[in-house]
Image: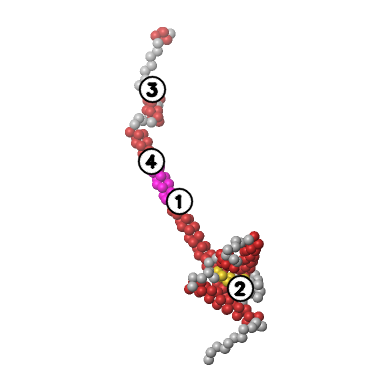
Amino acid sequence: MGRGKIEIKRIDNATSRQVTFSKRRSGLFKKARELSILCDAEVGLFVFSSTGRLYDFASTSMKSIIERYNETKEDPHQTMNASSEAKLWQQEAASLRQQLHNLQEYHRQLLGQQLSGLDVEDLQNLESRLEMSLKNIRLRKDNVMMDQIQELSRKGSLIHQENMELHKKVGLVHQENINLQKKVYKTKSNGHPTGSTIQHSFLTTDNEIGPNLELSLPENVEKE
């Protein structure tokens, strides 16, 4: 049984109208993209929703498509006058203002604000973008942490190497001190006697001096 033909008229139910708009809009953009790829055509498409939200598609650049459209619409033998140029810039300014408004609205939606006008599909797309952004942030965070860990490990290795070199230098200094002490002790044992030994050799008691010592008086003292 074939699918029934849909009557082309305004859908009264707001939810059904929003769902139909999302599906038809996606299909229209898909057809425009396929047309530009298959036929090498330059396609530009604007869609405004019932709430005033802008959806656009451009196979190359929307600005170049609009300029080409304006040039083709006018007489190709006439140059663009001041009024048409001003009108073009007004359109460009309006497009930029609309893009800025859309970006601000998208930013608020990322912050979890003004979500009441979004349908299920838009919420799912927003959720997917947030999950992708969160995944990229976590990946970047992991990379930064790994770089910091590697840098700290490298610094730790350098500090450990410096510590080992200082330990070797302390060991060499300690060994030199031991060698110097050995040389000093060797010199004392093989050289001249110390001061205490010399002093002891010259000291005797009264008993040792008495018997062996003979005193002689001068002649004049002896006669007296």
The amino acid pointed to by label 4 is Glu
The CA span between labels 1 and 3 is: 77 Å
Q: Are marks 1 and 4 in contact (CB under 8 Å)?
A: no
Residue 162 on the magenta segment: yes
Residue at point 38% right, 14% down?
216
Disc number for residue 159: 1
Which range is magenta? 160-173
**Sequence-wise, which precedes: disc 2 or disc 3?**
2
State the residue in front, 178 or 212: 178
Comparing labels 3 and 4, the label whose residue is closer to the camera:
4
The CA span between labels 1 and 4 is: 26 Å
Question: How many labels sit on residues?
Answer: 4
Q: Tell which residue pokes out farthest to the front in this image.
A: 77
Element on which disc 4 rests: helix
Disc number for residue 210: 3
Residue tagged 2: 47
| Within-10-Å neighbours for mark 1: few <14, some 14–19, many 20+ | few
